[in-house]
Amino acid sequence: MNARPKRRGRQSLRFRFFSAVAFAAAVFIGVMLVLNVLFFHSFYLLQKKNSLVHAYNSINEQYNGDISILQDNLKQMENNNNIRISILNNYGTYIYDTIFAHDRSTAFLDSMMQNPFGEMLYVYDSRELERKGYTFSTLNDADGSTAYVALIGILRTGDTILLRVPTAALRENQSVNFIFLMISGLLALLACLIAGFFIGGHFTRPVIQMTEVANSVARLDFSKKYTGTDPDELGELGQSINQMSEYLESAIRDMQQMNEQLHKEIEEKQRIDDMRKEFIINVSHDLKTPIALIQGYAEGLRVGINESEEDKNYYCDIIIDEAKRMNHLVRQLLDLSRLELGNTVPNKTDFDAYELAEAVAGKTQVMWQEKHLHVDLSGVGAQVLHADYDMMERALLNYMTNAIDHTPEGGQIHISTSEDTRHIVMSVRNQGCQLAQEEMDKIWDKFYKLDKSRTRVSGGGSGIGLSIVRAILTAHAGGCGVRNTEDGVEFYLSLPKETE
């Protein structure tokens, strides 16, 4: 017998699903952090450069040498995009500057005139400036306290424009953004773990239930069913398992019924074989004695062992009696076989039940008078029987001879009839010993004999008489039986009510 596989934890699939979700979330958050560290600075600079280019194009389109028409737009750009704007003419004189626009003191103006770009140090690509009209540069204050991403361009009026954004905000934004990503990543990971736990339970619950159903089927317990109703592959799989369970249950039930039927057939075959063996033994036993007697007396006649005519006649009478005995037994067997095989069809006629009982009592009169028995026919009514008269007479004779054999001397035998809505019952009741309960079914088998001291036997001791009675009643679609009474036994036969 194969060992059962070790059962894994019921939550193993759920745990793997939960782990996969957690791993995917961790990888996603880790990639986000790495991308932020490696590429946020470049992405931020690119965005700022695009913002500077957009501001340059807008100013270049609108500026015609008169700065007053751009005052409001320039202030809006400065406030919205944190861009510092400076415009100089060909002589290096400020036409507009973000600081100059807010501080118009004489000292400041003098300093700006002396050094147009103040204390800033910068480098740029002059060739790109000539080709595109603008170029980018990185500016620093002379003391290095402030750094800028700057766009230096030539406007269509020939004036020079300097657009710059401080990079201090970049470092601050990158630091804040990294911290925010760390916090939001941890919160997102926690949310993913919680969601993964519940979602994993939702998706693995049908699998766990199907596993329980499959394990029950493996134990031949088909009571559990998958109850999920999800219209997906898991739902279809669950319904398939239910169908498989039903098919297996039906197949096993059919196999069990077939096994039970086969077992009954085997038992019936064994019973028939036992009956056949018993039949052969009983026939051999019943024929052995008369054959031996016939053989012995015939040999005696041949060798002339008898000395007188009287002895010779005695030997012949014994041979004739034993031959009659054998002939009677053989005829009983042939009659029983014809009845059981259905070769003898009853010739049904209507006749009076009392006439049948009177005829049987008359044929057995010598036997019951010899034992000083009293036969009572007062219980027989005027019912009309629709049956084969000869067969019914033979059946009733069997009952009567058995009753005579087993009724004590001076006892009584009662023949009576009764009826219900469907049957007419004719019974023979006699005084004497009762039958044991386990023997009431066996006495109808061929050659079954009971202890003669306490039960009756059939057909002159051959054990065939009651078998013939049962076969006769079966041919008539009727029945027969026996029951104990207060002072003896009652055999009965029933016939269905029929008329031609």
Image (cartoon, helix red, strand yellow):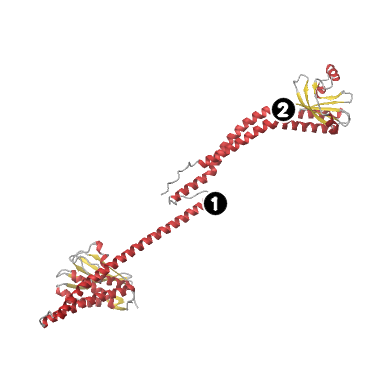
Residue sitting at the far top: 107
Residue sitting at the far left: 307
Using the image as rendered, state which of residue 332 and residue 123 is in the foreground.
123
Residue 447 is situated, as x and y percent measured from the top left of the image, at: 25, 69
Q: Nearer the observer, disc 1 or disc 2? A: 2
Q: Quadrant of residue 174?
A: top right
Residue 30 is situated, as x and y percent measured from the top left of the image, at: 62, 33
Residue 464 is situated, as x and y percent measured from the top left of the image, at: 25, 71
Residue 359 is situated, as x and y percent measured from the top left of the image, at: 23, 78
Using the image as rendered, state which of residue 297 and residue 257 is in the foreground.
297
Please state, as top left, top right, bottom left or bottom right, where the C terminus lies in the image.
bottom left
Could you tell me which residue is drawn at 66 percent across and 29 percent down?
A: 178
Residue 386 relative to residue 223: left or right? left
- Residue annotated with mark 2: 170
Say whether disc 1 or disc 2 marks the residue closer to the N-terminus.
2
Q: Is residue 209 above or below residue 382?
A: above
Q: Amino acid at mark 1?
A: Glu
Q: Is residue 236 above or below residue 392?
A: above
Could you tell me which residue is drawn at 42 percent across and 57 percent down?
A: 253
Q: Amino acid at mark 2?
A: Leu
Q: Quadrant of residue 427?
A: bottom left
Res. 230 in view: no
Using the image as rendered, state which of residue 392 and residue 239 is in the foreground.
239
Q: Which mark is residue 236?
A: 1
Residue 466 relative to residue 82: left or right? left
Q: Secondary structure at mark 1?
A: helix
Q: Is residue 258 above or below residue 426?
A: above
Q: Secondary structure at mark 2?
A: helix
Could you tell me which residue is drawn at 23 percent across and 73 percent down?
A: 398
